[in-house]
Each structure stands twice: as C-alpha cells, then as structure tokens.
Image (tube, coloured by chain):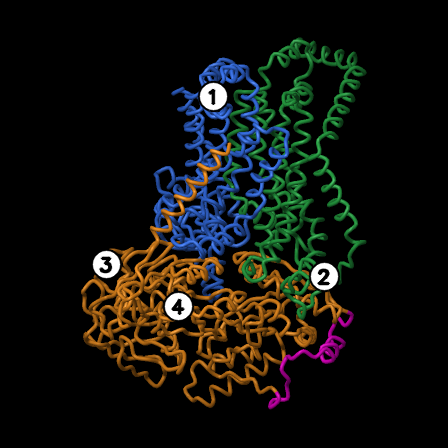
Amino acid sequence: MSSTNQHMQNCSTTNNQSITGKQYVRQSRMRIVMHHLRKNKGAMVGLFIILAIVFVAIFADVIFDYDKDVVGIDISRKLLGPSWEHPFGTDDLGRDILSRILYGSRFSVSVGVVATLIGLGIGVIFGAIAGYYCGIAEDIIMRINDVVSAVPSILMGIVIVSALGATTFNLMLAIGITSVPQFVRITRASVLTVRNQEYIEALHATGISEFRIIAFHVLPNCLSPIIVQATLRIASAIIAASSLSFLGLGVPAPAPEWGSMLSLGRQYVRTASYLTIFPGLAILITVLAFNLLGDGLRDAIDPKLKK
Amino acid sequence: MLRYAIKRILLMIPVIIGVSFLIFFIMDLAPGDIVDIKLAEEALTFEEIEQLRETYGLNGSVFTRYFSYMVNFVQGDLGTSLVSGRPVLDSYLEKMPATIVLACASIFVSIMISIPLGVYAAMKRGTFADNASMVLSFLGLSIPNFWLGLMLIIVVALNVPGIPTGGFSKGIASVILPAITVGTGLTATLARTTRSSMLDVLSQDYLRTERAKGHKEIKVIMKYALRNALIPIITIAGGQFAVTLGGAVLTETVFSWPGVGRLIVDAVNSRDVPMAVGCIILKSITIGIVVLIVDLLYAVIDPRIKAQYGKRKRKQA
Amino acid sequence: MKRTVIVTLLILLSCSLVFATGAKEEPGTAAATTYKEEVVIGVQSRTSSTNPTSQTSVAHKIMFNLTHNGFVGYDERTKEILPELATEWKASSDLKTWTFTLRDDVYFHNGEKLTADDVLFTWEYGKNASNATVKSFWNGVESVKAIDDYHVELVLKAANIDLLHLLSNEYFAILNREAVTADATKGPDIGTGPYVNKEFFSGDYTLLERFDRYWGEAPVTKTLRFRYLPEGTARLAALENGEIDVCQAPNNTELDIIKANSDLVLNTWQTTALTFLALNTEDPILSDPNLRLAIAYAIKVQDVIDGAASGFAGTANGMWGYFQYGFFDDWKSVGQSSYETNLATAKEYMAKSKSPNGATLKFTAASAWTVNALQIIQDQLKALNITVEIEQVDAAGLSRKSVSGDYQVIIYSVTFTSAGSDAARIFTPGNSVNYARYNNARVNELFSLGASETDDAKRKAYYKEIQTIVHAECPYIPLYYANSGVAHSKVAEGAVYNTSGSHDYTYIKVAK
C-alpha cells in the first residue's frame, strides 16, 4: 500500500515539474517531424492526393446530382465504353462510372480508413499491454488474439451485419475487428524490442507512471512498423470490403462503393474491362497515396532512419 | 528451448477451446441454419422443417450443442458434414495437398520478387528507384486477387501453351498462375521488411570493412549484408506461409483450386456447423504449429534470440 | 547489376522453353471416326455427394442420370414418360395402387442382378434418406410388394396422378440391397446406369467410367470427367484452351466470344427457372391487392431483363411454367390483362389502394446479381412514389426470413416441373417456397381436386381457374425466364441438352 502511494506521489510531482519542458519538447518534435515531412516529395504527393480525395468526398453532393448522375438508371446507355461524355464508360445499368467512382470515394475511403483505425486502436492498446507486461497478461492477450484471428472475415461480416444491421459502420467494424490481431502482434513485437532499452529502464527509476511510459515513451518509438502496417492495411480493408459487399454486407445498393463496383464488374472482365479497371485504379491510387504519406511519416518520426 | 516449445504447444489447447466455442457461438448467431439452406433447394412443408431441425439436433441451446460437440471432439471425433455426410477430418485432409502446394509456391513467388526488390530499394535508398520499387511491390496488394487471377487466365493461359487455366491435377504447370496471384499479394509486406532490414544491416561497420577490403558491392550485399538481414525476412515469410495454409478463397475459386479456403467459406455459407468449426480448428492448429516452427527456427539461427527466451523466462519467474 | 538482369532473363527464358516444349502435342492426324477416351465437362456447381438419395439439385441429377436408373425416364422435348427399368406400368382406378414390370436383363455395377427385392429395399432405405424430398416421397408410399422377381406393386397413401413424373426424377433411383448392406457409405453409389462412379473429389472433379454390362446401348466414351470450375470466365477459358470439351452455363456476358470462335458451338435456350417478385400478402401494407397490382403494372420487365440478365431472358406471362401442364395465359378471354407496363393502369390501382400517396417498401435479394434487378425496379417504382430499400442477405438468411415472414418483397427463382400440381408449393400454405404467404381457400381446394382428377379437360379447367384467381390477386409478379446455355467444341456430339439444365451426357463423344 505504502509503496503504491509513494509511487503515485512521485508520478504527480514529476508531472507538475516537467509540464512546461515536455510541452516544449513535444512542440519542437512536432516541428521537426513536419519539417522532414515537407522535404519528402513522395509524402507531399500522397498528402495532396488524399486531400483531393477528401475534398471530392465531402463535396460530392455539390458536384453531382446524386439521383441523376450517380444512381439514375438508363438501360439504353448501358455498357458504353469510355468516351468524352462518359470518360470511364457506363456500367451495366447505364450509370456513369466516373461519377460513381468519385461519389464512391465517400464510402470506400472512409471504410478503408475507419476500419483500419478501429483495428489500429484496439490492436495497439492490447499489443502494447502484451508486449510491455510479459507473463500472464501477455499470454492471455496473445491467446485471445489467436482465437480472434481464427474467425474468417466473411463469418465475422455475416454475424456483425446480421446482429447490428447492414450499415456502412458495421462493415467498417467487421473489417476493423478482423485486422485487430495483426496490429496486436506487430505492436507487441516492437514494444518487446523497445521495453528493454536502457532509457526505458531509466524512466522506471524516475517513477513515472507505467501508462505514461507506455503512451509517451515506448509507443512513439514503435511507430514505424505500426504506421507501415496501417497504410498497407487500408488497401486490404478496401479490398476486403469488396468481397463483403458482394455478399450484401456493406453499403446498401444503389449507393456506389468501389469494392462492390469491382465485384459486380467481375462478369465483364473480358468484354467490358473498364467496369473493373477504373474502380481498381481508384483503389490503387488511394492506397498508394496513404502509403506514400505513411512512409514519409515513418521516416520523419523514426530517429534511426535519419541520416 | 524444448520447454518453450512444450509450453507453446500446451498453450494451443485453450486457444482451440476458445476458437471452437467462438466459432460455434458465432455460427449460431448467423441468420439461418442448415435446414434453411436445404429449404432453398428442396420444397418442404413447415412440418418437415421442424422434423429436420430435430434430426440435426438444432433445437437445443447453443451451450448444450457445444458441450456434446466437445465431448465428441475430445474423443477425436470432429463430426460429419451436414451437407455431404462425410467426416470433417477426411474432407479437410483431402484438401491439404493442394493447399500446401499453393502455399509453398506462393511464398516462393513472393520471395523471388520481394527480396531482389527490397535489396535493390535499400541500396538505392531515397532515390526514385527506391520509391518505384516500393510502389511496384505494392501493386500486388492493391489489385484484387480475383481480377489478377482472371487476367492471368485470359492473358497467359490462353496464349502460353502448357499453362492450364486451373485445377490441381495438371501437375506443376497448374500451380504457376495461382501462385503468382497469391504471391504478388504478399510482396508488399515482404519487400518492405527486406528493405528496412537491409537498411539496418547496410549501416553496420563490418560492411564498411568488407568494402574497404576491395570486395565488389554486389558481393558485399549478397554475401554479407543479405545473410545478416535474413532473420526478420524469414519471420515475415513464415507468418505469410502460415496464413496461406489457411486457404485463399478467391484465388481458389478463380482457378478451381481444391483448397481449404473454399471448404471453410462454403461451410460457413451453408451453415454446416460441424464442418465450419472442425475446419477452423484444424486451420488454427496448422497455423499455430507452423508459426511455432518458424519461431524456433528463428531462435536456432540467431543466438541472441535464444538468449532472450531465457531472459524473459527469468523475468516472469 | 546488368549481369543479374541478364541472368534473370536467361532463367525466365529457359523456364518458358521448358514449358513450351513440355506442352507440345502430337498433331491430330487420326482418322475422323476415332473418339477421345475421356471427355471432360466443365460444370458450374459443386457436387457434394454420389448418393442419389441425398441430393436433388440439377448438378447432382446430371451425375445420377449417368450412374443410376429409376423406374421411368422423362423426355423434356416430347414431354413423354419413357420406360427405363420398368417396361410397363398400370395404375388402379383410384390412382393409389401402381404395378410395374421390371426389365430382366439389368445388372448393378457390383454384378448383382436387379430384382423386385431391390425396389423393396429402395423403399425401406428411402424412408430414412438424408434428403427431405426423397424421404417424404418414400414415406408417402404405404407399401411395396414384390409380386415376383420382376413385378412390383406400389401402394400410395394418397392418390397421385403425377406419380410417373415424380418417379422420373433421378433421385428416386433404384439401389441394390447387397451393395448398401455391405457398405453403407459407398453402397448407394452403385446403380444400374451406363457409368460407374470411379473417383469423386468434392470441389474438384468426379470421374465416371463406362459400365460394360449396361442394359442399354453402350456409350462410346470410356471415361467422363466432370470438372468443377465455379468462375464463368475461367470455365470458358478452359474450353478455349482445350482443357474441357463442354462448358456448361457460360457467362451471358461472354456469349459473343463463343460465337466469334469457329472451333466452338453455342447452344442457348430459355430455362424453366422463373424469376419473380413475391409480395408478402400478410404484410400490413402489401395485403392490399390494389397496391400489388399497381406495382405489377409499373414494372418494365424488358429493362429488368436488359440490365440484370444482359438481355438474355424471356418474359414471363404468368406464375405458371410455360412448359407446365395446364399453363394458361389468354388473359383477354377471361376479362383480364397481362401485367404489361402501363403506368396509367398502375396509377389507377395506386389511387384505389390504401396508400394512394406512395409507400416505403423493403425488397430483399439473396445474390448480388438479383440486386441489379431490384435497382432497376427501385428506379421504376419512383413513378408511383414508392420508395424501395434494397437489402441483400445470403441464402440461409433468405430462407430464414421466408419461414418467419419477416420481409415485404423477395426476388426469387423457382424451377417448376412439368407436373401441374408442382405449382401448389408456391400457392398453398404450409410450404416454404410460398414466399407470398398466399392463402386462398378456393385455390387450395382446386389443387387438391386437380391432384386426384383423371379427366384431362376437368383438370385443366381447375388449373385455369387457379391461374385466373392468382392473376387477379397478384401475390407474385412474374419477371422472366433467364436464358442459359452450353458451349462445346465443335467436335463434341451426342449429348442431350435440356432446358431444365439436367443434361444427358450418356452418349457424348468427341472426335480426336
């Protein structure tokens, strides 16, 4: 009892003393990161593309007449190849593919990002706990992790959507949960390498609370593999959404979503390839942008990689 | 080491129990059951439906059903499929050869692409070539498997003699296209790991010594650097191999490859509970064992890791 | 670096050479009269069992037709019942007692001779069959009596004019007592058909081998291999590549590729699978027939066909198979009109309905393809101010909904048999396929009258009355009969392709 009290006291005193200093350190670190990021051309290109996509997604309603351009069916102009009028062609129900792709960014990008954030959020917490506190906590978390990773994503999708309803958020949830185990594993692995470093042991000696050690000293030094994993995961999430939305577990029709556009174009791979090529390219470009930005961030944050 | 291995194997037991319960429970939550599936094919009266539910033992609570399933499971009986009436274990093992062949071939493809790409990117760090190689490794991840698979069939199988469009029974040539489809999806992670692992090694002093000795750069890279960078690469590749052993549903569909991925998805879709639970348990065991072997290999290769196992154990004590 | 590039290129080159040389085939110089020993058929559906009493789907029926025989067969083209194991049959006047004369020259694949005792055994076995359709049929048989070795008498619990039609289904095949007693799992594989089950690898292929003691004309091809190729594009590519000789059900979107290829032959036909909308008549909003009729008249079926079936389908003009006994569609003669698109009529019905200002309805589909059809209908119903929400569930989810009644509109397909009584399953209560949850006392009565009526004219009159009642009340909106087809190499011949999809490959042969 007494030792914990003392420990807590220590914590609070250190906090009070170091507030101004730490704020300064954090701010300047932020500035350094931004500085490095700005110098990285790839990252800037990525950021620009992401901002453009986000812009289109937000203002999609202003740019398009949803009822006419995006979901308006006109069988007489179905399956038209790319032309001036329809740069990406029209789909099997006569809808303009370009409008649908641009409008669909709203769903697809958010599915990719939110699902990844869900996985990241849960995964990092448990991964950090498992990696930092070895022993029983680690064993339990890692075993539960093994159990969860055994559930096929289709099964997870069916159950979550049937239990909670076929909404976009539930799709994100289903995909996010299936990606949790990966994040747990990767966080744990990098926390393991960091926690035995001398400076962490030194922090113990100062009596800072373990939560603060993990959150402010261990995790920031593990970020690089986690960021890489997260940017890669956005791609898998958008593609996972394509197989789930094919089963009706996603954005309800007729709203456009890249994944379902891809899946439905499957029958036309040979005869009207533009039905799959353009949504595919949209996914590719988005994922690439996130990845370039992610790599830039990683390089900017990770002190080891600076030369 | 041996103690560690035994501990890991023992730890698989609670995992298996957890997996079986979770899948059993989730399958119960999913709307509809095997009788509903049969309804889609056979016109039944409502009386017959009730009768069928009784025969399949679907009327008890999920806990009683799980309990009786586990009683059989402990005795080594994984049950029989509600669809085909065949033992679950037989159905699973029957699909293993195709699955193992595809997993090995895919990892091979992945390694053959990622390692040269990763090494090259690391050597050219920060240049356009570096970025371009990473983007290239990335393509496989962002192209959906079914699309790549169909494209390979149309472009390669239809034009290159001797390469079949699919199936498992056509010998080594039949695995080429499915392996490319799965393998390219794995390159992004592996190429990245290779690059960063190479970067770590390339900055080490001993390489500078080797270069100073007048060895050619390519020799320094291949002989000294890559060898030392291999461990993380093997770990990632091993993990990927384990996951691929769990099946690759879309690729299996496109290439009519008789693997376990489709078996599991078909079982889930047809609400074949014993089949789904049994196959997923078997899959977890397979993955668990492969991951364990990789971890042990890792320890064998790198004495530092071996030491760490000892150290961590001390800490827990 | 250059050297590595060159080395890699060399490796790749040598690899491709190995494959290229390994694949060379001797040119086809053989005489035109010789046929391939093995014919490979690419199929779209997985088969999960070789036991004829366990599965009733079309994919399985194709197999069972080759390995087993029943009392009678059925010719879809002439609509005639054909003798198979039974050469003659006779029904009592109350249609309950049926006597069959069996062939005396039939052997099972295990060498046993077919006798009346095997029929008795099939009945005993069938009463516990794993398949509910098979089980309930054999349980509807009161008794089976072997009069002598080659004469057998079936007594039914209820009269059934369509017994022979039913018995022509492959899953009522006759099994061998000795085979099943000796091996309960593999025994039912043994039949009397022209081909023997040789190897079965679920999810990959089924291999059948010619049976030399087959009672009928011997097939030409020694082995038939059915390869499971679920992806339509890949299946067609396998045909183009010469890996398979027959490609069942090519994608509608790729028919032009087949037509353009002079080595391939395309057969297409309108199937007997009717796609329709079922309107839940127990739903508070949809219980109103005027609203149902308004929807029926507002739908432009041709657009649905063009958008959802690539234009390859025929319109359906009633909820009764066009090939089915008693089909009636001369609506004008009874003062009705067919549900052709007529927005004015639709609006009239809408005005008469309880929701004249529009409604919000949920439409449920069980596959991504039918969702396409629903999107078109969703667009069309905007004209009536009806807002459609589309929901997609999987097969199990849809069935579960149908049992619980928790839905408003379902899009679904049913393949009727040629027997008139088969329509009862969508119109009478207590059936799982009655997705409209339709219950009309007169219709129920007419079906039971029809089942025991021997007079053709009277039976047709009953069925006509059913169709007119149903047409006026509109629990279902018929949409289309999708087309299907088979593509095969131009040297493949001898197979019989049926519109039901249950093809007969017994005499298929492919010239070398």
> Which residue corresponds to the image point at 57% horizontal and 77% vertical from the top-left?
C315
Note whether C433 is above or below B194 in the view shown. below
Colour in which the image shows chain A? green
Residue C323: percent from left, percent from top:
47, 80
Colour in which the image shows chain C? orange
Q: Is residue A34 magenta?
A: no
C-alpha separation, residue under disc 3 versus residue under disc 1: 69 Å
C-alpha separation, residue under disc 1 versus residue under disc 4: 57 Å
Mark number, residue C181: 3
Mark 1 neighbour density, 10 Å: few (under 14) some (14–19) many (20 or more)? some
**Residue in front for this viewpoint, C168 or B223:** B223
Pointer 3 or 4: first along the chain: 3
Q: Which chain hosts label 2?
A: A
What residue is disc 4 on? Answer: C489
**Residue in front for this viewpoint, B256 or C317:** B256
Q: How many marks?
A: 4
Residue C313: percent from left, percent from top:
55, 73
Instruction: Identify the amino acid type marked 1.
Output: Tyr
Q: Is residue C337 magenta?
A: yes
Give the chain coloured blue: B
Query: Residue A41 is drawn in which quadrant?
Result: top right
Tag 3 and tag 1, C-beta contact below 8 Å: no
Residue C219: percent from left, percent from top:
27, 71
